[in-house]
Image (tube, helix red, strand yellow):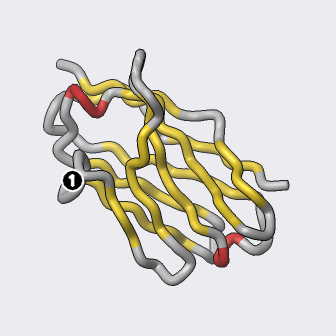
Amino acid sequence: QVQLVESGGGLVQPGGSLRLSCAASVRIFRFITMAWYRQAPGKQRELVATIRSDGSTNYGDSVKGRFTISRDNAKNLVYLQMDSLKPEDTADYYCNANSPLLGTYWGQGTQVTVSS
């Protein structure tokens, strides 16, 4: 069983920054691929960024160059640094953990609103 708890969402003006955090309650955290997804109202959930156990990362095309995913294996945390935010980044952001051994888990989500 893996529990994921996101934090750090909120309201920010266009061009601003936010950092999301996800705390994972699992002993083998460092071996698990972690990701952030987002879902805007009326749209499908989409992949934002992925970070694997070796630290390699992938980003969705819409966030490349603006968002950075990172992880702290000592603290069982994964972060999403979001810079140069745009109104179209407004969505609920979800932390995801994926392991061949444990399966796939989701956090409850944190809301990000980009508006002036």
Residue type beneath disc 1? Arg
Q: Residue at x 66, y 44 (%)?
A: 106
Q: Identify the residue at the far bottom of this view.
A: 54
Point out residue 102 in the picture as x, y percentages from the top left corner: 80, 63
Q: Is residue 24 above or below residue 90?
A: below
Q: Quadrant of the N terminus?
A: bottom right
How many C-alpha atoms fall within 10 Å of the one at disc 1: few (<14), some, or many (≥20)? some
- Is residue 40 rendered to the left or right of residue 88? right
Q: Quadrant of the C terminus?
A: top left
Q: Is residue 78 above or below residue 20?
A: below
Point out residue 30 in the picture as x, y percentages from the top left corner: 64, 76
Q: Nearer the viewer, residue 91 or 62?
A: 62
Q: Identify the residue at the far right of this view.
A: 1
Q: Quadrant of residue 89?
A: top left
Point out residue 90 in the picture as x, y percentages from the top left corner: 32, 27
Disc 1 designates what residue?
A: 66
Q: Is residue 25 above or below residue 3?
A: below
Point out residue 36 in the picture as x, y percentages from the top left corner: 48, 50
- Is residue 26 rendered to the left or right of residue 45? right
Q: Is residue 104 above or below residue 93?
A: below
